Image: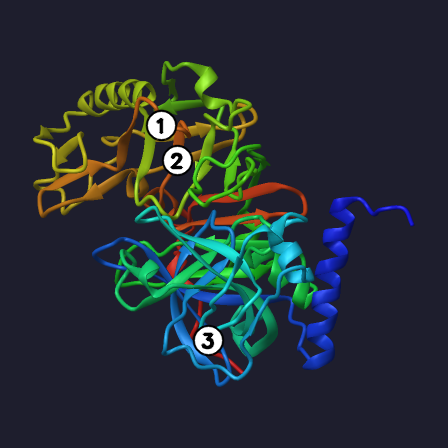
Amino acid sequence: MASLPQAHLFSLILLSLTSFSISQTPLIHPNALVLPLTKHASTLQYVTIISQRTPLVPLNVIVDLGGQFLWVGCGSNYVSSSYRPAQCHSSQCFLAHGPKSCDHCLSRGRPKCNNGTCILFSENVFTSKVSAGDLSEDVLSLQSTDGLNPRSAVAIPHFLFSCAPEVLLQGLAGGAEGIAGLGHGRIGLPTLLSSALNFTRKFAVCLPPTTTSSGVIFFGDGPYALLPGIDVSKLLIYTPLIKNPRSVATRVYVTEPLPSYEYFIRVKSIQINGKQVPLDSSLLAINKNGIGGTKISTVNPYTLLQTSIYNSFTKLFLQEAMAHNVTRVSPVAPFDVCFSTKNTNGAFSTPAIPVIDLVLQNKKVFWRIFETNSMVLVGDDVACLGFLDGGLNQRTSIVIGGHQLEDNLLQFDLESSRLGFTSSLLLRETSCANFNFTSSL
């Protein structure tokens, strides 16, 4: 019999896993799912809540936009009648790794001993620690939505995740029990959820602007309604998602180079108040080794720029700001460029703080960054530019960090390989904190 193309084979495996799940437990098939988001005060990590296991247990997990999969710390407190480890040579193991997946298997498992299980390396991206765990499956329950309000919860049996050692939790926000990977890999949450529930392979992230407000994640297509009744999915501007052929983030042990699971876009230039930042344009492209380009990250709290880009960027930003009589003050770590906000109620009058544009596929398509996303209040009388020097040898030239993403809706359309973005929702008199989580059925 002729062999199937590998991509087609992966699709059949996903279909078979989904069919098995549905045959065991009837599923409601919503058009979308919704999760709340909060920002942890001391770590600046973004936290969401999922429910897992039988009986269901609510878990706080950190959101990693480019993460490969869901991993959860498994110890003596992991008790579930529906937990199953994935065996080597199984379809689940093949889906997670590909055909060479059974070279390494664990002789002991979590939460109990399991011989011959499929190994899966999990990574804490905040501490750069990596540890082997078991590829496993268990019930996952999330809230459905019609885009306006939360609706009934949907339980998905046999949902794949990594059962990792609890030591890997060190460095995560207090109370967090794992990391939810939203990357575009085969067992990332967006792919598994869309396959299990048969909705379009899209998801949207709206990060909360403060540590006292909430944000929202949608899995599936719009509407994405924020109070006072604004469907922000209709505000999206689109740019292509770029595939990076080599992962530059993961420290997980692999025998051969892997493509990146993270989300990259093509920034062609940067403008400040309409003036172009002089920079080496070759840094904005991704080379054959995966170096360069621009990615979007929820792991980095602030945007990182390669040193030469950073120096040119801050020089022009300062020139434009000082032209409007802004008073520069001493830097406040980790920031280099800081200004006084005395007599301004913590804000600057327009046009004192320059407008930043990330110019994308052409001059008419740009991601505009206003004061609320460019500046960080660090005291009663000081605000600093929330862009950091990532170093001369930074592997990704521009890493757009969390602060620059807050109160912006981002839709990741994996079907069409494009990113939709809104720029600041404050200009539309709404916010990422305005999804109505209080009403549900």
Label 2 residue SS: strand
Q: Where is residue 101 in the image (x, y as percent from the top left)?
A: 61, 51
Residue at 39% across, 22% down? 274
Label 1 residue SS: loop
Q: Where is residue 77 in the image (x, y as percent from the top left)?
A: 36, 78
Which image quarter: residue 209?
Answer: bottom left
From the image, state whether disc 2 or disc 3 is nearer to you.
3
Location of mark 2 (residue): 399
Question: Mark 2 belongs to which amino acid?
Answer: Val
Task: Residue 313: tell me if it is visible.
Answer: yes
Label 3 residue SS: loop
Question: Mark 1 belongs to which amino acid?
Answer: Gln
Up-down relation of residue 353 to residue 44 (above or below)? above
Up-down relation of residue 87 to residue 410 (above or below)? below
Which image quarter: residue 271?
Answer: top left
User: Toward the viewer: 244 or 289?
Assistant: 289
Location of mark 1 (residue): 394
> Would you say the residues marked 1 and 3 are in contact, meaning their CB atoms lie under 8 Å apart?
no
> Would you say the residues marked 2 and 1 are in contact, meaning their CB atoms lie under 8 Å apart?
yes
From the image, state whether disc 2 or disc 1 is nearer to you.
1
Q: In which quarter of the image is the C terminus?
A: bottom right
Up-down relation of residue 392 to residue 351 (above or below)? above
User: Toward the viewer: 379 or 21?
Assistant: 21
- First in residue order: circle 2 vs circle 1: 1
Q: Which colour scheme is used?
A: rainbow
Q: How crowded is mark 1: few (under 14 residues within 10 Å), some or many (20 or more)?
A: some
Residue at 75% across, 65% down? 16
Location of mark 3 (residue): 112
Does residue 438 appear left or right of residue 222 in this picture?
left
- First in residue order: circle 1 vs circle 3: 3
Does residue 302 appear left or right of residue 382 in this picture?
right
